[in-house]
Amino acid sequence: GVRSIGLRINTATLELLVHNGTTLAANGSLALTNNTAYWLRVLSDGAGNCQLWANATRVGVSSGGPASAGAASESILYIETGNGANAAQQIIAVANVWVSFAR
């Protein structure tokens, strides 16, 4: 199965999503504040352990991330937003993206 690490905004909460090829999990969360910019960093040690950092503070940890490399066609950056059952806008603006894969 596809192994992945991603981010999701779910009704003003940022979540770390991890998938180890079998199970999808949402771990770690950050309550977002309106009109605030965040410097985000996601770290993976390649053994399934992932961390979500926001503005130099660790806000989430997961042991359910990818523990082995996937196919080259599976290397994507995925970010999701949703507004749940309310009418509030959930907007994500992405700037200065740097993705690094270490093997």
Image: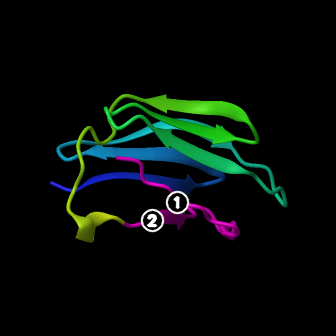
Determine which of the numbered discs, if any, sits on residue 77 in the image.
2
Q: Residues within 10 Å of mark 1 (few under 14, many from 20)?
A: few
Q: Is residue 38 or residue 91 the one in the foreground? A: 38
Left or right: where 49 falls relative to 79:
left
**Picture coordinates of residue 13 (x, y %)?**
62, 47
Question: In terms of image quadrants, where is residue 30?
Answer: top right
Q: The residue tagged with tag 2: helix, strand or loop?
A: loop
* Element type where label 1 sits in the image: loop
Query: Image quadrant of residue 58?
Result: top right
The answer to which of 102 and 70 lies nearer the viewer is: 102
The percent position of residue 25, horizontal first and vertical second, equals: 35, 40
| Magenta-tinted stretch | 76-103
* Extreme-right residue of the structure: 35
- Identified at 23% across, 43% down, the residue is 68
Q: Residues at badges 2 and 1 in contact (C-beta under 8 Å)?
A: yes
Question: How far across and how far down the image is residue 17, in percent?
Answer: 42, 47
| Distance in Å between CA atoms under marks 2 and 1 | 8 Å
Q: Quadrant of the N terminus?
A: bottom left
Residue 83 placement (x, y as % from top left)? 58, 63
Residue 3 relative to residue 56: left or right: left
What kind of secondary structure does the magenta stretch mostly adopt? loop
Residue occupied by mark 1: 99
**Amino acid type, callout 2:** Leu
Given this view, does label 2 or label 1 mark the residue nearer the observer? 1
Ranked by sequence position, the earlier of labels 2 and 1 is: 2
Asked whether residue 30 is drawn in magenta, I would say no
